Image (cartoon, helix red, strand yellow):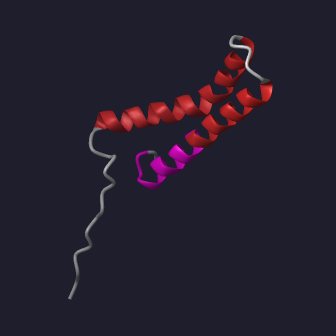
């Protein structure tokens, strides 16, 4: 009476290249978010508040992507 458990695989985890691309996107969002805000403030002369909100949004997106990658066990 033992039932075989079906493992559901996330659709994103298809190949090594997709996994690598997702990790690179995550790292660039996490570490590039604050730097991107700095560049936008100094080079493009956009308001400090808008650039800070954008940088915070990029870091938040990176954290969400990192949480998702840990959840589907791409990052151990």
Who's the residue at 57% across and 41% down the image? 61
The residue depicted at 56 percent of the width and 39 percent of the height is 62
What range is drawn magenta here? 62-74
- Seen from the viewer's position, the closer of residues 61 and 16 is 61
Relative vertical location of residue 2 with respect to residue 45 in this rendering, above or below: below
Number of labels in the image equals 0
- When asked about the image quadrant of residue 54, the answer is top right
Residue 71 is covered by the magenta coloring: yes
Locate residue 27, reporting x and y percent.
Answer: 53, 32
Left or right, residue 66 beside residue 42: left
**What x and y, as percent, mark residue 45?**
74, 14
Pick out the residue farthest to the bottom.
1
Image quarter for residue 48?
top right
Above or below for 71 versus 46: below
The picture quadrant where one finds residue 29 is: top right
Q: Residue at x 69, y 36 (%)?
A: 56
Residues 26 and 41: in front is 41
Position of residue 40 relative to residue 21, above or below, is: above
The dominant secondary structure in magenta is: helix
Q: Position of residue 42 (x, y in %)?
A: 74, 13
Question: Which residue occupies the extreme top position in the image?
Answer: 43
Is 41 one of the magenta-colored residues? no
**Up-down relation of residue 43 to residue 70 (above or below):** above
Q: Residue at x 32, y 46 (%)?
A: 13
Along the horizontal axis of the image, is 53 left or right of 76? right
The quadrant in which the N terminus is found is bottom left
Residue 68: x and y, percent? 48, 50
């Amino acid at each position: 009476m033992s039932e075989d458990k079906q493992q559901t695989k996330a659709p994103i985890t298809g190949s090594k290249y997709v996994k690598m691309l997702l990790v690179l996107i995550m790292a660039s969002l996490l570490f590039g978010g604050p730097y991107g805000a700095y560049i936008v403030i100094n080079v493009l002369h956009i308001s400090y508040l808008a650039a800070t909100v954008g940088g915070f949004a990029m870091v938040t997106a990176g954290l969400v992507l990192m949480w998702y990658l840990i959840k589907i066990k791409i990052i151990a």
